[in-house]
Amino acid sequence: MNASFEHRKGSLITAIALVLAAAVIAGSAVCYFSLERNGAGFLLSLVILAVVPGAAYLLYRQLIFPYYRRLEDANLELHLRQEELLDIKDDLFIKFLGVYDVNYAANSPRLFSNRMKDVADVTARVMEAEVCLLFLYDKKADELVLSAANKDLMDGLKNVRVALGEGIEGWVGRKLEPVMLKDLRSDGRFREIPELNLSRYQSAYCLPLYVYSNGALMGVMEVLYTKPRSFTDEEINFFTTLSGIIATTVQNEQMQIELRKMNLELEQWVTEKTEELRSSEERYRSLVENACDTIFVVAENGDVVFVNEQAASLTGCTKYDLVHKNFFELFVDSAGLRKLLAEAAQGGRGLSHADLRKADGGIVPVDVSAVGLTLMGKRFVQSVVRDMSSLLQLENLLKEKQKEIAELKAGRRP
């Protein structure tokens, strides 16, 4: 096409140059023959000069005028294309603003139901639809539940459900494919929803709300028209982009709901366990406080964390002073006790003899037993210290008596 245009352009320029050359030559000849007073040449030159305007007119009609008309037609076509591009640009700008509005509405801090209502309003406005319906997928019931609509269509509507696979909406949700229908009612998949009266609409565009990253169906979105409608590429791209935004928003909302539910259950579980541990600790504390034995609760490194009244009575220290001491500081020789506590921390049990140093410097022989203990989720060692001084006194007294008896028996022998 460019080669043909260049050829015609060259032919036109050549023809114009020839006409102009003929006019110049004829005019020069008229002047020459007029000066030479050559009548025959003068008349011939005038005839040729008179023919030049005719040739120029013929050139205009045959070449210049059609070229000019084609140029005007091309200019008009270019203007129409420019107007069309401007319309497409305006439409794309409107669609861009629609995507922005939908994204803002879907992620605003309002309640989820209100956000979905705003999304339906914006979608209906940008798609120039009479109705926009938003169904969310109930996985347990395998149904689509009407959750939002534009205008005030949701007023008075409760529990509108469509089984997956039934009707246009259910088919889209099952097949995960969009449906564009110019004549909604003539389609074999059409099923009436009494609460919505879908039969009064002529055209429909239904799209699945699907998260491709994890293969999860979130629901279905549908726009309805009372008059036959075809959809442009811009509208298809806009609606597809919209479905991705809304599907992600619905998934995030469901995840947040599940997370809040898990957090609530976890808080309840922690509260219950904390109460159980607190009650258990209180029972343990009560038993230890009222026990007749001297009881120490120590960390694995030997730091004292709890003692009962018997411990304060045995050592001569206050309970406050004892919980600021290390268990091994209370004994003359702690080598055997360190081994005992290490075994108890590993789940073993044991008994050891030691000498307890009292606050006044006195030494008390004691038996020390130890066992592992878990309190509030932490590992401790419970040690029971028994005062053996009275028992040792009785044993010494018994030995003395036995010695006296032996001496008496020996003195009676002849």
Image (spheres, rainbow, N blue to C red):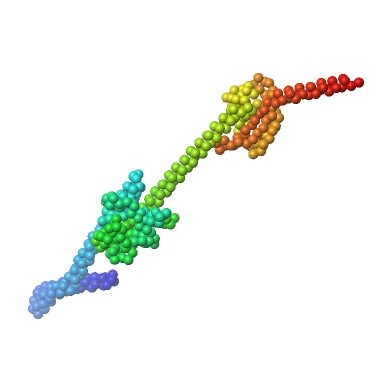
Residue at the image position 55 percent from the left and 36 percent from the top:
376
Q: Position of residue 380 (x, y in %)?
A: 60, 35
Q: Residue furthest bottom?
A: 40
Residue at the image position 37 percent from the left and 58 percent from the top:
163
Q: Residue furthest right?
A: 414
Nearest to the observer: residue 202 or residue 17? 202
In this view, 14 is above or below 285? below
In the picture provided, is 19 more to the left or to the right than 151? left
Nearest to the observer: residue 30 or residue 122? 122
In this view, 230 is above or below 307? below
Q: Position of residue 274 (x, y in %)?
A: 51, 37
In the picture provided, is 323 more to the left or to the right than 6? right
Q: Position of residue 262 (x, y in %)?
A: 45, 45
Image quadrant in which you'd find residue 80: bottom left
Image quadrant in which you'd find residue 372: top right
Nearest to the observer: residue 307 or residue 55? 307
Q: Position of residue 204 (x, y in %)?
A: 29, 60
